[in-house]
């Protein structure tokens, strides 16, 4: 991977490690954003208005995180993997079903994807921290907290809570 020259004094290994992690997170974040938008657009059923409104906030937040991730990549001398073609090629998330319309099925599909995304973001925190890039680890920590909160909010709709 060739780095664009940057006055950022972070070591080359830390930059390369962080760029690799950030591009993976960016691709998954864009894919998750699009999955949430698909659910927002197509859902029908119980709790429609509450879920519809909540998901609009979710995809707006995810879009902002995607922007933050891409900007961090550029700060480190990298190039974001943000095109539709690269997202389709590199996402680690399961393809979102096109035929789902029922609100609670959308919630189940989103729970699965938020959980998967949160897991890889947490792995990225450890990887970038170990590489010496505390700022990227901090950004990913912020994203991780938000993903966990959204996951909890979705999971609460499933009725799978114990007691």
Image (cartoon, rainbow, N blue to C red):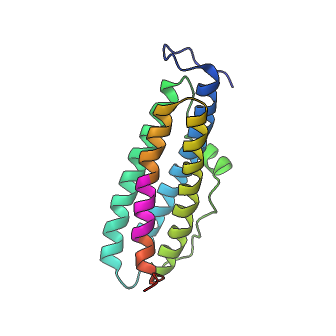
Image height of 92 relative to 99, above or below:
above
Q: Residue at the location (55% across, 56% down)?
A: 117
Which residue range is magenta in the image? 145-153
Describe residue 146's horizontal placement relative to residue 130 as left or right: left
Identify the residue at image location x=58%, y=65%.
Answer: 96
- Is residue 9 magenta-colored? no
| Image coordinates for residue 93, horizontal then vertical, percent | 62, 58
* Residue 9 at x, y percent in the picture: 51, 16
Is the stretch drawn in magenta largely helix, strand or loop? helix
| Total marks in image | 0
The N terminus lies in which quarter of the figure?
Answer: top right
**Residue 37 visible in the displayed image:** no
Identify which residue is drawn at 40% across, 61% down. Answer: 149
What residue lies at 63% left-to-right and 32% top-to-bottom? 17
Q: Position of residue 145 (x, y in %)?
A: 42, 53
Residue 158 appears in view = yes
**Residue 152: % across, % down:** 42, 68
């Amino acid at each position: 991977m060739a780095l664009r020259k940057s006055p950022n004094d972070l070591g080359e290994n830390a930059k390369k490690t962080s760029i690799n992690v950030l591009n993976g997170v960016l691709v998954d974040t864009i894919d998750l954003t699009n999955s949430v938008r698909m659910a927002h657009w197509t859902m029908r059923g119980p709790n429609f208005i509450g879920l519809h409104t909540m998901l609009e906030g979710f995809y707006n937040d995810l879009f902002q995180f995607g922007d933050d991730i891409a900007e961090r990549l550029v700060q480190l001398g990298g190039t974001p993997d943000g095109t539709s073609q690269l997202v389709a090629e590199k996402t680690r998330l399961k393809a979102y079903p096109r035929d789902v319309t029922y609100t609670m099925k959308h919630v189940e599909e989103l729970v699965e994807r938020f959980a998967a995304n949160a897991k890889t973001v947490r792995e990225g925190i450890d990887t970038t921290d170990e590489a010496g890039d505390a700022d990227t680890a901090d950004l990913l920590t912020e994203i991780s907290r938000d993903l966990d909160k959204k996951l909890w909010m979705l999971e609460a709709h499933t009725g799978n809570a114990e007691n």
